[in-house]
Amino acid sequence: MSDYNPNRRCSRTHNRVVRKGSELFDADGVKLEPSDFQTLDQRSKDDDNRILGELPPHWA
């Protein structure tokens, strides 16, 4: 195997890739989420089910 040579090839320059509409940042209220359509009762029920699902079996 040959010795390490840092000059054996030129370094790659970084090209920034920008695709419109694929931004990861979402300001609050800009996009609608499924939870926006739930009533308070539905949210409460979902929270209860989630909490009960996270408990060990002997607690439920």
Image (cartoon, rainbow, N blue to C red):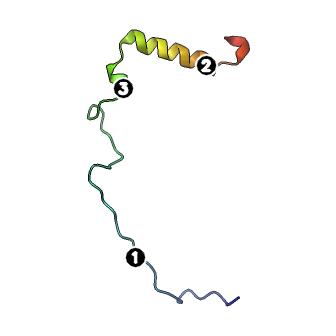
What residue does disc 1 label? 13
Farthest residue to the right: give it: 58
Identify the amino acid type marked 2: Gly
Image spot of residue 59 (x, y percent): 69, 12
Name the foreground residue: 22 vs 51.
Answer: 22
Disc assigned to residue 53:
2
Residue name at image x 39 percent, y 71 percent: 14
Label whose residue precedes the other's in the sequence (2 or 3): 3
What is the spatial separation of the Cα atoms under label 1 and label 2, in whole angstroms? 49 Å
Q: Which residue is mark 3?
A: 34
Q: Residue 6 appears in which quarter of the rendering?
A: bottom right
Q: Secondary structure at mark 2?
A: helix
Q: Give the class, few, some or many, for how many residues have Cα within 10 Å of label 1's Cα (few <14, many ≥20).
A: few
* Image height of 55 relative to 14, above or below: above
Where does the C terminus fall, quadrant-wise? top right
Element type at mark 1:
loop
Reply above or below: 19 against 53: below
Q: Amino acid at mark 3?
A: Pro
Q: Residues within 10 Å of mark 2 (few under 14, many from 20)?
A: few
User: Does dot 3 land on a helix, a strand or a loop?
Assistant: helix
Distance between the Cα atoms at labels 1 and 3? 41 Å
